[in-house]
Structure formats: structure tokens, C-alpha cells
Image (cartoon, grey):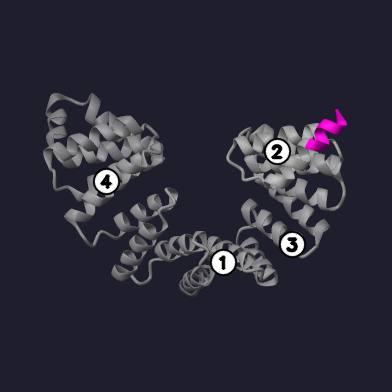
Amino acid sequence: MAEEKEKEIIGYFTDASGQKQAELRDAEAYNNRGLAYFHKGQYDQAILDFTKALEINPKYEEVYYNRGNVYDEKGQLDQAISDFTKALEINPRYIEAYTNRGFVYLKKNQLDQAISDFTKALEINQSSLEAYNDRGIAYAKKGQNDQAISDFTKVLEINPRYAEAYNNRGLAYSHKGQYDQAISDFNKALEINPRDAEAYNNRGLAKSEKGQLDQAVSDFSKALEINPGYAEAYTNRGITHAKKDQYDQAILDITKALEINPGYAAAYYNRGLTYYLKREYEKSLKDIEKAQSLACQINPKFLEELRKASKRKS
């Protein structure tokens, strides 16, 4: 139904009579058609319309916001930030522009700027779930897990059914080594959304850290049933198999992860370690060096020992 409405809007502007075409001179009309293109995934056409709207009305903050969202979807993050900033110059209380600019800063790993934007959004609306949740993510990425937990807890006080906040708080507890609390939160997330592959993966990691290896494998397998393209879950299941001395199963899983994501440095590293444990040093060295080429930090002493072992084996 929504798609039919979008087609109707676009057709109205592009195929109608000359009288209706004249309405395109109105900035709102360009904005509306740009939104329709955006929702259809036709981002370049959307940008053209939003830009035209701004030529007509340079003070139209909503259009800067909308164009910023399109740039974000296209991965043009600096342009997105520029447009959100322009929207905020026009309307300094535009909460959505703060939260979305903050999220783009989060993508760019500019964590202090992200936190600043989410905090500003919360000054405008103290009940913004999105701002609390995303600020919590930024704190967690900075290693400030207590602040992260506080923000995720605030989300859950406002909305106890916010599954993502349980998952995020569980990760923060895991980072603090509080695995029982983490598992409790992942359980809650899965009660709310039993199809949350990420929550199964994260619970599997916590159980693995607690030495509950069979349960961890079960969680990773469940994550993969839900999302067969989840490379991280294959890698984590492989690592857990390796902990159980099941090296062949480990290699099969991690190889599957690399089929899904050939640039996955951690997968090369962990498969290399598994080959090392099997004393297949040449294969191990090949994977470890590949991981290093993908910017994975390798212990120099280990790499030196591995190279010596590989030469002895050959």
C-alpha cells in the first residue's frame, strides 16, 4: 500500500498536466517527491529533489534533514553531517537532527561528538529512547561501561519492552566480565524478540566465557538458523569448537565465515590459531599473515615462532 502511494506521488508530479507540473516550483512539492524517491531507495533522484527544494527555500530545515538522511544511507557521512548541521543552524531545537547527526558521528567513531549530540537531544526531550540508547552505545565504545549501563537502564525504565536496550546492556555487562547479568539481559531480549540473532550470538559469547561451551554452541547455531549469513556467529562457534579441541569443526565454521566475508581479519586470525593448534604451521602462517595484512595486530614473538615452526615443517 505504501509503495502504491509513493508511485502515486511521483507520478502526480512527473506525469500530470502542465498545471500540476507547475506545483513543482513549490519547495514542499519537491520535498514530498524527494521523500517518495527516498522510500523507494532511489537516492540520487531524492537528492536532486531535495536540492531543488533548497534552491527555492534555503531556510527549509526539514529538507536539510531529509537530504542528510539520504546521504547517510549512501554512506556519504560528511555530507550527512553537513546537512544535519545546517538544519540545526536554522532550528536549534530540531531533536531528530541531533540524534541522527550523533548516529553518523557514531558510525565515524567520533564518539565525543556523538555523545554531545545525544546529550543535546536529551536536553530537549528527556524521554528520548533513541538518544539514551545511542548515547549508551557511544559510551560502551569508549569503554565507559557504567555510563552505558546507566543509559540503557534509563531506556528500559521508560520502555520495558525495548529489546535492543536489553541486548546492549547485556553487552556492556559482558565487557565488565559480569556474565550472569549479561545472560539475564540477553534472555530478556530474546523473550521480547525470539528472532534476535544478535542476542543469541551475544549470549553464546557470555556462556563461552563462563565455560558453558555446549550451551554457547547451541546459541551460535540458533543465531545461524535465524541468519545464515551471520559471519561473526560462524567464527564464534568455530572458536568455541576449538576450545573443545574440535579443531576440524572449528576450521569448517571459520572457513564458512570467510566465504561470507572474505575481508574478515578476525576470522583469518582465529583459523590461523586453530591450524597452529593442529600443528599445521604453513596453513597457520598463511592465515596469520593474511590477518595482519587486514590490519589485525599480531604478537611479534608469536609470529616469529610461527615462521620458524613453518620452516622446520617444510
Asked if residue 230 can be seen in this view, the reply is: no
Front residue of 244 and 230: 244
Quarter of the picture containing the N terminus is top left
- The span from disc 3 to disc 4 (Cα, nearest Å) is 43 Å
Marking on residue 288: 2
Secondary element type, mark 2: helix
Given the image, on which type of amino acid does mark 3 rest? Glu
Label at residue 82: 4
Foreground disc of the pair 2, 1: 2
Q: Is disc 4 surrounded by few (<14), some (14 to 19) or many (20+) residues within 10 Å?
A: some
CA–CA distance in space, label 1 to label 4 = 31 Å
Q: Where does label 3 land, which residue?
A: 209
The image shows residue 180 at horizontal and vertical percentages of 70, 71
Q: Residues within 10 Å of mark 3 (few under 14, many from 20)?
A: some
Q: Residue 153, position in %: x, y?
A: 51, 73
Give the magenta range.
308-314
Principal secondary structure, stretch drawn in magenta: helix
